[in-house]
Image (spheres, rainbow, N blue to C red):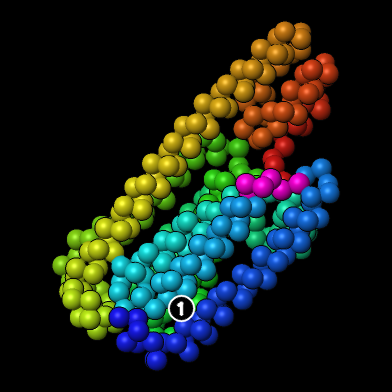
Amino acid sequence: MTMLLQPLLGVSEAIEAAVQLGPLLAIGLLYAKRVRTLAHSRHPVPGWRQACFYGGFVVIAAALSGLGGESQELLYAHMIEHLLLGDIAALLIVLGLTGPLLVPVLQIRFFDRLRVLAHPLVAFPLWAVDLYVWHLPVFYEAALRHTWVHALEHAMFLGFGVNMWMCLFGPLPMPQWFGNLGKLVYIFAVRLTGTVLGNVFLWAGGAFYPFYEHGDALAGITPVADQRIAGAIMMVEESFLTLGLFCWLFLRAARENEERQELLDLAAARGVELSEKRAARAVAGGHGAELRRRIEGGSVSAATETAATREPA
């Protein structure tokens, strides 16, 4: 099917790929340069994080090159492309970030002020509005018909996806109330939002996007069937991702409880005063190892309070 439209789509696809992959290539080069710099410091970037970051870029390239043509013909192919960009690639990119990596970026006043967008109460509605607005027929079909609009759509799916995942896995500081319970509610809200949209596609009685009628005819399916397949794909992806997130949160909570108890036991054995609340704050903030060193050194006063309460860079 793609071959039938290749003469018409080839130039457009090449331009669109250049528009979308060009900035990503520049970001990748800057990331690699910063990783090399940090390799000789006290905060090298772990190999698994680098693999995640570059893996995210591989997913983006695969989605745009492997599904670019099909997404112009079939809705379900376009849905797969969007899920790869907004969910999977965005998640991998965030997993590849660390606080020291972002220091040069956050030293720029403009980008530092943008940190407010990563607040859970801001990131979630931004992501939800972006998801639903782009699936309105007027904007969705505009993206299909115009290269620059399509590039903007993909950039926003990826950007707001990264911002949404930053609340759960990113190195930026989160509010104190956004602990494991807050993360549980956040995950539920995000996944429910996506599930509702998937159900709309799955159970709608009519097709939303007339643009796909030609491609559906070539594929031998009806526009409604294409739309329902897209909704089903979205529902399956949401289910697996939700299950994975719940498992991660459960394991995280169990690990934090174990580490907190180990710190309390160590403090008691060393005769060092340490409250359960202070130990919990240190563990939740990723400062358990630092607090352990201070306990072993017999000092958990003001310095420990700083370690336990400050938010990660």
Residue 281 relative to residue 237: left or right: right
Q: Residues within 10 Å of mark 1 (few under 14, many from 20)?
A: some
Q: Is residue 97 above or below residue 152?
A: above
Magenta span covers which residues? 44-49
Q: Is residue 156 magenta?
A: no
Residue at the far bottom: name it.
7
Which residue is at the front of the view, 147 or 135?
A: 147
Dividing the picture into quarters, in which one does residue 113 lie? bottom right
Q: Is residue 290 above or below residue 88?
A: above
Dividing the picture into quarters, in which one does residue 112 lie? bottom right
Say which residue appears at 62% left-offset and 22% top-offset: 260
Q: Is residue 145 above or below residue 181?
A: below
Q: Is residue 47 magenta?
A: yes
Give residue 102's position: percent from left, percent from top.
72, 55
Give residue 184's position: percent from left, percent from top.
45, 39
Q: Secondary structure at mark 1?
A: helix
- Residue 126 seen: no
Say which residue appears at 19% left-offset and 68% top-offset: 225
Residue 305 relative to residue 297: left or right: left
Residue holding disc 1: 150
Label count reads 1
Say which residue appears at 75% left-offset and 50% top-offset: 100
- Residue 167 seen: yes
